Amino acid sequence: MSDRIFFLVAILVAAVLVGLALFPGMNRLPSGPVSGGNTDYTRIEISGKQLNRMVAGAEHTTIELQEVDGQSVLYIEADSEALNGDPLRSPHFVLATDLETVFAGRKLRVTVSARAADRYGAEGIQLDYALGNSQASGWQEFILTREFREVSFDFNIPPRNAGSEPGYDYLAIAPVVPEKQRAMLVRWVTLEPIGPPIAAKE
């Protein structure tokens, strides 16, 4: 074998090995807390494959990404036994500590684009913003249809206590389930802080 052929084969083998090493991460979906990194924190959007960051919260709940009209949307299905009113036991996004810090002491506008699923279509959606296990907005309910529509609510997040360590906030999003099971599709979620922050409590 000539040196030229040898080096060509070596380069091809090296390229294949590098490709195989990188391939497992190429199709890996995002997971873990939602962060505002690489943004100016005026509008945090969770859309596309970032919707995969949602956590089921409890058994008897199904969450999965689906393609609808060429767009990634989040399918959420729950039965009446799965939802007990606890936002952390419901489908939810965990919000990273940077968002807890930015949102503290401000009004936050939460907007969700959603519709009823084709099967087990939910007639309503409920949203709850929770600060750990301490305080929450309470469930906010809205009507769903077979077409995507935006639902929104504002929540005045209390300021942090001075010197306290930042923690995680949570945004729970679930279908209203009067009986059996219900399902819906979420196209995107936005979080928008409004106005200047209130000073932390001493």
Image (tube, helix red, strand yellow):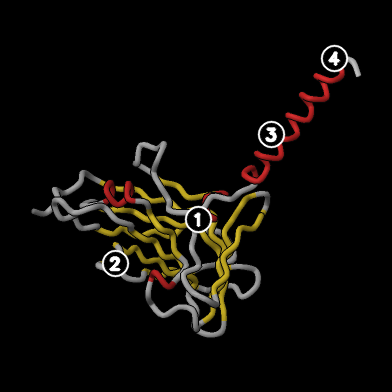
Q: Earlier in the sequence, mark 1 or mark 2?
A: 1
**Along the line of sight, which residue is nearer the eye, 59 or 70?**
59
Q: Which residue is mark 3?
A: 18
Using residue 47 as the reference point, say whether residue 155 is left or right of it.
left
Gap in angstroms between the C-alphas marked 3 and 1: 28 Å
Give the structural element (helix, strand or loop) at label 1.
helix
- The image shows residue 192, relative to residue 141, as above or below, that is above
Gap in angstroms between the C-alphas marked 3 and 4: 22 Å
- The image shows residue 111, relative to residue 141, as above or below, that is above
Q: Earlier in the sequence, mark 4 or mark 2?
A: 4
Gap in angstroms between the C-alphas marked 1 and 2: 21 Å
Neighbour class for label 4 at 10 Å: few (<14), some, many (≥20)? few
**Along the line of sight, which residue is nearer the eye, 101 or 80?**
101
Q: Which residue is mark 4?
A: 3
Q: Earlier in the sequence, mark 2 or mark 3?
A: 3
Asked if disc 3 and disc 4 are in contact, CB closer than 8 Å, the reply is no
Asked if disc 4 and disc 2 are in contact, CB closer than 8 Å, the reply is no
Give the structural element (helix, strand or loop) at label 3.
helix
Closer to viewer: mark 2 or mark 3: 3
Residue at 38 percent across and 51 percent down: it is: 191
Q: Which residue is mark 1?
A: 53
Q: Amino acid at mark 4?
A: Asp
Q: Earlier in the sequence, mark 3 or mark 1?
A: 3
Gap in angstroms between the C-alphas marked 4 and 1: 50 Å
Q: Which residue is mark 2?
A: 136
Neighbour class for label 3 at 10 Å: few (<14), some, many (≥20)? few
Closer to viewer: mark 3 or mark 1: 3
Using residue 99 as the reference point, say whether residue 157 is left or right of it.
left
Residue at 65 percent across and 72 percent down: it is: 119
The x, y position of residue 136, in whole percent, is: 29, 67
